[in-house]
Image (tube, rainbow, N blue to C red):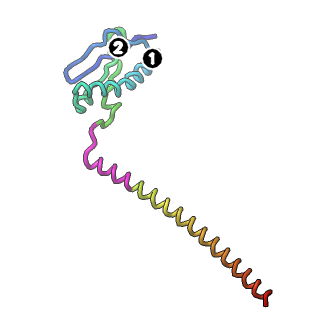
Amino acid sequence: MLRYYFHLRTPDGLQWDEEGVPFACLDAAYLDACRAIPGMTVELKRAGTRPRQVLRYAFEIADAEGQFLMEVPFSAVLGEWRKPSRSQVSEQKAQAEIQRTRSLIAAVQRERDALYATLSQSHALLARLRALDIGDRGQRQ
């Protein structure tokens, strides 16, 4: 196993990883850095770091000799992590309302179809009843 060091680049400078972590390969170290970023982001936010600042953070992965191997920017993992704008919130609410309306329309259509089926059965039963009534009148006469 090779030892990889995850130095943390911040807007204030570089925080050196003195211990490192053993991994089978650089890909495994990269994936571990990617998995760590969301949790670190939550911690940084709790500590008062602004989202735009967090997007400027990055891991600089180095080998045991101190050779820089790879950078893993927080922004690459987090994407456009920021508080949604009012228009985004309004759009999300509108989309949710559209979906709710579609569901209600579908439910009303199902109820209508069930009512039509019941009405059709009622008409058939009334027709049979009339036929029986006419038949009974003919036999009584």
In the image, is 44 to the left or to the right of 69? left
Q: Is residue 33 left or right of residue 47?
A: right
Residue farthest to the front? Answer: 140
> Which three-letter amino acid code belongs to the residue tagged 1?
Cys
Residue at 57% in and 64% down: 114
Label 1 or label 2, whichever comes before in sequence order: 2
Residue drawn at the location 53% of the way across and 63% of the way down: 111
Is 99 or 5 nearer to us in this picture?
99
Query: Where residue 131 sits: x, y (%)?
Result: 72, 81
Q: Residues within 10 Å of mark 1 (few under 14, many from 20)?
A: few
Image spot of residue 7 (x, y percent): 30, 16
Residue 5: mark? 2
User: Range of the magenta residues?
Assistant: 82-97
- Residue 26: give x, y in percent of width and height: 42, 18
Picture layout, residue 115 above or below residue 79: below
Task: Check disc 2: other Cα within 10 Å, few if <14, some if 14-19, many if 20+.
Answer: many
Q: Quadrant of residue 62?
A: top left
The label on residue 33 is none
Marks 2 and 1: in contact by CB < 8 Å?
no
Residue drawn at x 62%, y 72% is: 120
State which quadrant residue 25 falls in.
top left
Q: Main secondary structure of the magenta part?
A: helix
Which tag is nearer the camera, tag 1 or tag 2? Answer: 2
Q: Could you tell whether 69 is left or right of 55 in the image?
A: right
- What residue is pinned by disc 1? 25
**Residue at left offset 31%, top offset 19%:** 60
Q: Residue furthest bottom?
A: 141
x, y percentage for residue 22?
42, 12
